[in-house]
Amino acid sequence: MKIIVTGGAGFIGSNFIFHMLKKYPDYRIICLDCLTYAGNLSTLASVMDAPNFRFVKESITDRKAVFALFEEEHPDMVVNFAAESHVDRSIEDPEVFLDTNIKGTAVLMDACRKYNIRRYHQVSTDEVYGDLPLDRPDLFFTEETPIHTSSPYSSSKAAADLLVLAYHRTYGLPVTISRCSNNYGPYHFPEKLIPLMIANALNDKPLPVYGKGENVRDWLYVEDHCKAIDLIIHKGREGEVYNIGGHNEMKNIDIVKIICRELGKPESLITYVTDRKGHDMRYAIDPTKIFQELGWLPETKFADGIKKTIRWYLDNREWWETILSGEYQDYYEKMYARRI
Ligand code: NAD
Ligand code: TYD
């Protein structure tokens, strides 16, 4: 089995590559990633020299490069993680979100059509469903919940999902889509809530909580997400959408307080700042379908997952410190200068 994993130098994609190489040592994994600010090749250092792994630095929006890679590799499957993923950046500058998240998805699927791929899997997000009110804890997102987006990020992901389903219906492309809740764990880029708070707390810097900190997210340990995608690409039904979530709803402020407690830092570091524009109140996934069809359940409890995550950030200070200093962007040049 040959799988192209796009966006594999980012947070979830890299964790997925580690999971797949460990579980399926006879698979060949090709990571296609153009290394935006969110891509960090040093994350993949431990697998770069593995004989069944290849890294290709190209953009999924580059039709010529994508088709050339398919011509060379003739992959069996594509798992598309590549995306602009940060809501706040999408509010500042939406355009690149449209290019990568929508057009890039179309380019990949066009290549999949030409090369008769066995499965195209789109990694999507629960944010395509919009948000739920705080006073209705009985409501959850199911796969039938209407698409109703709030940010340029979620709109671009929703547009991509619609294109994926259209390619299935129109061209018979064998697709699946997963819509997951917020992930946390190792290699999470320190612009997102949990790693940002850990890094700031360790540096005794203010912990910027948007609004009142009452927004709720349904947190899932990244390994559990990777296991769910593994199940979907092997056993999921073509043309189907699967929600992935942890039944683990937490208020932002409670997460920040847990991080302070675990690191022995004072809550006085918490600073309430101006709210995000259009800020979604609550995300909550109903994962019944993936449980009933594929037997998936989250394995890591938040209490354990957050401890493991904090431990990882303590043990891997260099990884996130080189990101904060900007040095990680030289890593590609260093790696490849050494290889020539
Ligand atoms: P990330 O921002 O950490 O990583 C994105 C990766 O994609 C980076 O390595 C980047 O270099 C690469 N990339 C960006 N544009 C590219 C392009 N044009 N061509 C090739 N590579 C490109 O993102 P993440 O948090 O790992 O998210 C991965 C996927 O999962 C995204 O599609 C996101 O929408 C989805 N998702 C994320 C979460 C979450 O909590 N992080 C939850 C649900 C769904
Ligand atoms: P984030 O990690 O950006 O994920 P998403 O917006 O995709 O859910 O943010 C998670 C929550 O944390 C969201 O409600 C916004 C909030 N937040 C803060 O309060 N402060 C911050 O510095 C960041 C980055 C996020």
Image: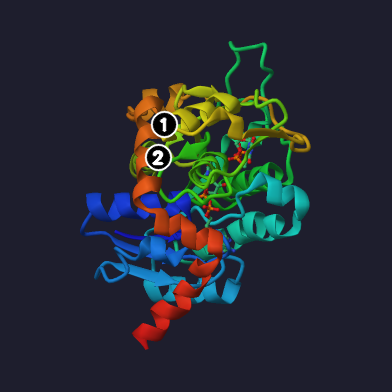
Residue occupied by mark 2: 310
Which quadrant, please, contains the N terminus?
Answer: bottom left
Total numbered labels: 2
Q: Secondary structure at mark 2?
A: helix
Residue 254, how many percent across, how many down? 54, 24
Is 71 displayed left or right of 218 in the figure?
Answer: left
Residue 232, how many percent across, how many down? 39, 40
Is 244 displayed left or right of 151 in the figure?
Answer: left
Query: In the rendered structure, which amino acid carries the disc numbered 2?
Result: Ile
Q: Earlier in the sequence, mark 2 or mark 1?
A: 1
**Mark 2 residue crowding within 10 angstroms, few (<14) / some (14–19) / many (20+):** many
- Residue 141 location, quadrant: top right
Q: Residue at x 33, y 27 (%)?
A: 295
Query: In the rendered structure, which amino acid carries the disc numbered 1?
Result: Glu
Would you place residue 107 above or below residue 264 in this image? Answer: below
Is residue 7 in sight in this rendering?
no
Q: Is mark 1 within 8 Å of ligand 2?
A: no
Residue occupied by mark 1: 262
Residue 47, how many percent across, how many down? 30, 64
